[in-house]
Amino acid sequence: MASNPSSKISNLKSKYYAVIVAGGSGTRMQSVLPKQFIELNGKPVLMHTLEAFAGSTLQPQLVVVLHASYHELWKELCAVHNFAIIHTLIAGGETRFHSVKNAIDQITDKNVLIAVHDAVRPLISPAVIDEAYNCAEAQGSAVVAVKSRDSVRQLRGDTSQSLNRDDIYLVQTPQTFRSALLREAYQQPFDPKFTDDASVVEQLGFEIQLIEGNYSNIKITFPDDIAIAETLINKKPPAR
């Protein structure tokens, strides 16, 4: 039976949680519909993302953070697509920082692992999700990243300088942490330089552990990204 998204964190105890941040407005997609709702191979991007986490062997509890004005639309889409993956739906905040904090504040279980993931990265591999949880359990943090494939230059004033691309990593999500560390980090006041969860945690002086991601874990940002994502999905071997 399909389950409607809930507005409360489940009472079911879990060691693993995934906070799916779905606050995009769709501006850069040149769309009136936020990009997490745009159809990708016949269903909204956000549904693909939730399916990836549901496919994790560790079976995290799923928490979707979405602007309150889109809650009814999301529930309607779940009904239309018979979307049965159980998840909790909570309201987002003014910024990504505040949205993540809202979710963390509602996860009351202690000593758990929390992954934070962009809703518009629908091609994340369940194997990478599992690896991130395992690394965070051992090391405290796990941030998915890939090496730059391109040459990189840094501009300072009017002068650019070549950087060693072997030292440059492109950061993705999920970004996974022990819950005590993440909660402490999000007690800090908001700072505009917080671009992701790793930067919030790093502000505490905590070292960030990188783990290898994959280049197909793209972020749906521009119209061409949908076509790229559909190509990548269609290249996957059929499920057995």
Image (cartoon, helix red, strand yellow):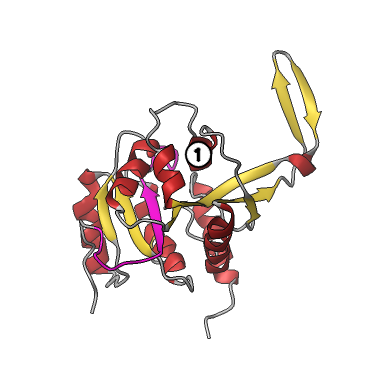
**Residue 130: percent from the left, percent from the top?**
53, 66
Tag 1, which secondary structure? helix
**Residue 225: percent from the left, percent from the top?**
53, 51
- Magenta stretch: dominant SS? loop
Q: Is residue 125 above or below residue 104?
A: below
Residue 120 belongs to magenta span: no
Q: Which image quadrant is residue 102 in? A: top left
Residue shown at 22% from the left, 45% from the top: 68
Tell me if 70 is positioned left or right of 30 in this view.
left
Residue placed most toward the observer, 108 or 69: 108
Q: Residue furthest top?
A: 157
Residue shown at 48% from the left, 74% from the top: 57
Residue 18 belongs to magenta span: yes
Q: Amino acid at mark 1?
A: Val
Tell me if 164 is positioned left or right of 16 in this view.
right
Where are the magenta residues, as a range?
Answer: 9-30
Q: Is residue 238 visible?
A: yes
Q: Which image quadrant is residue 131 in? A: bottom right
Residue shown at 53% from the left, 56% from the top: 227
**Residue 174: percent from the left, percent from the top?**
51, 53
Q: Is residue 40 visible?
A: no
Residue placed most toward the observer, 195 or 43: 195
Residue tagged by mark 1? 201
Tell me how many marks there are. Answer: 1
Q: Mark 1 Cα within 10 Å, few/some/many (few <14, many 20+)?
A: many
From the image, which quarter does the N terminus lie in?
Answer: bottom left
Tell me if 37 is positioned left or right of 174 in this view.
left
Residue shown at 43% from the left, 43% from the top: 29
Tell me if 161 is positioned left or right of 3 in this view.
right
**Residue 137: percent from the left, percent from the top?**
53, 59
Q: Is residue 159 above or below residue 214?
A: above
